[in-house]
RNA sequence: GCCAAUAUAGCUCAGUUGGCCAGAGCAGCUGAUUUGUAAUCAGCCGGUCGGGGGUUCGAAUCCCUCUAUUGGCUCCA
């Protein structure tokens, strides 16, 4: 007999070899019907795998991420089985579960696969699922595993096996499909009641673009058909928040083939929104001791040779611009830092001046591969809300903290709650990839980690994600369909001050090397606006929205009074527009609602007589009648409340 | 850049297996209407069917190619 400890700390005595599923049955039939996986002594475990020692046991259902993972991982196997039956001879790469579903990378050999083929595979999967195939786990020696896949002719699995240790290799067999797999899996395929294969994509084997590109099929499955339908509705809803769609509807930005791909054109309303954001940050930065600077859009090639960017990115940049007579070479500015270094170097500095903080909304141009461009989030020309802080090594932490204050202020003013903070450090196995001394890297990496700890930031650490010149801390926010985008960033840089030979005179009257901190709280105006649009579904906060108020005269007779009201908005620091069309009020309201204008001022006979406006709030409805001063104060209060420093 | 898909009016989309002047709704313009809290009516304008090449008696429709876009992969100073 063995003792099984359950999450409520109760202990069950069971026969050795009892499975988690048996224990679930013992608790209740209902639970047993829903158990997808388990963990035994914190090791993830098949529900059908016997337990042989005393253990703590957790049971996972569809409501647990572990349960979903087992479901989706098993679905990947099911898809592989279906694919193998439909396309005999294909070879398999890897097929894991992911955040929302699963994928499998498959070498389809001579078969050509497109999205048209997916429904056929889905159908086969459901057919196989109904057979309630069990997943059978088998421990296997490395030699046996190798001979199995050698015979099958699957070189991808062989490569994976070659990296595994003998004694740790398991296979899972379900139906006619056997896969190299660590598990766990759901008890049988019958749990999979609804299947949606979502996309076909190319994916390089092992993520290496020099290796073969396999065909990746993404999919998602559910234990109930209804849940799939709900998921699809959710996706449809999310698509409506897409910044590319809203950007068009709200006339914020556009692209033109004539201008070029990845080069956004800001329309008047988009420009207004962007300007409001810039003003907001400028105000915050002024308070925080930043000084504005301005640098040109191109820089001599030597500038980038000095900075090291030429060596690293020269080949993958927009081609240089040359002067006709002298033959000088210029690059479109891909970042502002070298320019700011030159500004710093324009005169000597005393330690008493530090930290010096140069800020610039600097437009930069980077050659991004065509397939990577994406709306406003990934473009070839964009404006960074850049600043470079030159300080002493002792000031790093304090400055880092100051920047985090700004970033957190912005995120809270815009109600960004689910912010992912990532600290990017060197790849410890590949240190020669980075410019700068071991000692400096050590120091800066430690400084970032300390700041994160002291501020209690819930940060994840990623090794190998650092920039080539220094470690960084990034702030990421998800878009409407869950993709992560980096917004704010703070990067320590010991390298550029070295390369530009920047110095300051210390208290000891000796020259010292300042440290540089790159930082951009928005990241880029383009990407930030994109994420902001998706975050608020186009319903911008009152202080940011291009038009705060739309005046709707009941009929043309009241256009004059409406215009008078419009003109007096300026007096209260409010902005708006008027709808003078010869339309019915219902129509004007509908259009204003669709344009997401926060306030509608409806004016007719009553209002003109009493010098008031009837106020309707977007998404809320009629608020009643106000005189202008009253409602303006109300609106301004709200603006104040939304932007005040916390 | 790679894999897959898409491209028809300013926008959203129809256009059956290739077959007369390529359609609709919205937007725009003109006129009528003078409107009280989510769509007033009528008329008009608007398209080298992404560009180029080919197959065919005939191409929006089939093929090739280029461009752009979308979903991934790789990349992201």
Image (tube, coloured by chain):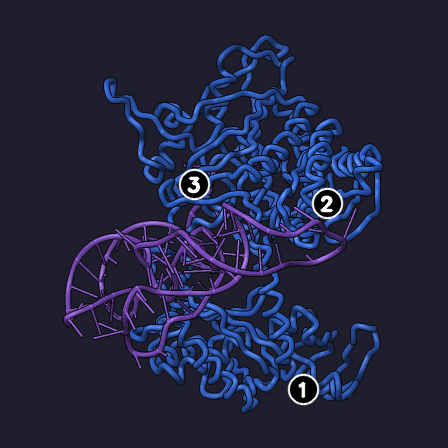
Please identify which colour was used for chain B in the image: purple
Badge 3: residue crowd in 10 Å (few <14, some 14–19, many ≥20): many
Query: Which image quadrant: the N terminus of chain A?
Result: bottom right
Element assignment for label 2: strand
Where A417 sits versus A452, above or below? below
Specify the quadrant of the image occupied by residue A394: top right
**Comparing labels 1 and 3, the label whose residue is closer to the camera:** 3
Q: CA distance from mark 2 to mark 1?
A: 70 Å
Specify the quadrant of the image occupied by residue A571: top right
Q: Which residue is mark 2?
A: A600
Query: Which image quadrant: the C terminus of chain A?
Result: top right
Q: Which mark is residue A17?
A: 1
Element assignment for label 1: loop
Q: CA distance from mark 1 to mark 3?
A: 64 Å
Q: Nearer the viewer, residue A94 or A283?
A: A283
Image location of residue A332, percent across then percent down: 38, 30
Q: Earlier in the sequence, mark 1 or mark 3?
A: 1
Q: Which residue is mark 3?
A: A263
């Amino acid at each position: 007999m063995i003792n099984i400890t359950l999450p409520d700390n109760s202990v069950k005595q069971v026969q050795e070899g009892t499975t988690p599923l048996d224990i679930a049955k013992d608790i209740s039939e209902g639970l047993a019907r829903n158990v997808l996986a388990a963990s035994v002594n914190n090791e993830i475990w098949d529900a059908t795998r016997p337990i042989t020692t005393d253990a703590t046991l957790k049971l996972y259902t569809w409501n647990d991420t572990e349960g979903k993972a087992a479901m989706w991982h098993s679905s990947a196997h099911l898809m592989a089985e279906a694919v193998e039956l439909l396309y005999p001879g294909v070879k398999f790469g890897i097929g894991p579960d992911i955040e929302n579903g699963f994928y499998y990378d498959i070498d389809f050999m001579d078969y050509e696969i497109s999205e048209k083929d997916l429904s056929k595979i889905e159908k086969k999967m459901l057919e196989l699922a109904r057979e309630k195939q069990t997943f059978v786990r088998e421990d296997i020696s490395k030699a046996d595993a190798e001979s199995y896949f050698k015979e099958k002719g699957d070189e991808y699995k062989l490569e994976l096996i070659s990296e595994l240790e003998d004694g740790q290799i398991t296979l899972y067999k379900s139906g006619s499909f056997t896969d190299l797999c660590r598990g766990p899996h759901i008890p049988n395929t019958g749990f999979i009641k609804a299947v949606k294969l979502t996309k076909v994509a190319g994916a390089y084997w092992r993520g290496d673009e020099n290796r073969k590109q396999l065909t990746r099929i993404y999919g998602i499955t559910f234990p109930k058909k209804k849940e799939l339908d709900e998921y699809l509705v959710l996706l449809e809803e999310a698509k409506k928040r897409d910044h590319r769609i809203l950007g068009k509807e709200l006339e914020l930005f556009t692209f033109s083939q004539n201008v070029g791909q990845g080069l956004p054109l800001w329309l008047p309303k988009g420009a207004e929104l962007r300007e409001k954001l810039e003003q907001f940050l400028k105000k915050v930065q002024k308070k925080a001791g930043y000084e504005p600077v301005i640098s040109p859009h191109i820089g001599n090639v030597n500038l980038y040779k000095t900075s090291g960017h030429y060596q690293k990115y020269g080949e993958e940049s927009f081609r240089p611009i040359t002067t006709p007579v002298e033959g000088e070479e210029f690059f479109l500015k891909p970042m502002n830092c070298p320019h700011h270094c030159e500004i710093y170097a324009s005169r000597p500095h005393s330690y008493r001046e530090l930290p010096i903080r140069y800020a610039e909304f600097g437009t930069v141009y980077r050659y991004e591969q065509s397939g990577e461009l994406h709306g406003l989030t990934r473009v070839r020309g964009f404006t960074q809300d850049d600043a470079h802080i030159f300080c002493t090594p002792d000031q790093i932490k304090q400055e880092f903290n100051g920047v985090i204050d700004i970033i957190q202020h912005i995120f809270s003013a815009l109600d960004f709650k689910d912010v992912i903070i990532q600290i990017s450090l060197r790849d410890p196995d590949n240190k020669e990839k980075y410019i700068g001394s071991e000692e400096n890297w050590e120091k800066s990496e430690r400084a970032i980690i300390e700041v994160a700890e002291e501020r209690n930031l819930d940060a994840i650490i990623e090794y190998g994600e650092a920039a080539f010149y220094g470690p960084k801390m990034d702030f990421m926010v998800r878009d409407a369909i869950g993709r992560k985008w980096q917004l704010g960033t703070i990067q320590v840089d010991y390298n550029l001050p070295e390369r530009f030979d920047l110095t300051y005179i210390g208290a000891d009257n000796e020259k010292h090397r300042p440290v540089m901190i790159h930082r951009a709280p928005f990241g880029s105006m383009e990407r930030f606006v994109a994420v902001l649009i998706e975050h608020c579904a186009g319903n911008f906060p009152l202080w940011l929205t291009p038009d705060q108020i739309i005046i709707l005269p009941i009929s043309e007779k009241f256009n004059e009074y409406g215009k008078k009201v419009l003109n007096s908005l300026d007096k209260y620091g409010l902005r708006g527009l008027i709808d003078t069309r010869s339309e019915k009020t219902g129509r004007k309201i509908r259009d204003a609602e669709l344009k997401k204008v926060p306030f509608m001022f409806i004016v007719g006979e009553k209002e003109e007589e009493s010098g008031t406006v009837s106020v309707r709030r977007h998404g809320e409805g009629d608020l009643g009648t106000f005189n202008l001063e009253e409602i303006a104060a109300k609106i301004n209060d709200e603006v104040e409340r939304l932007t005040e420093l916390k």
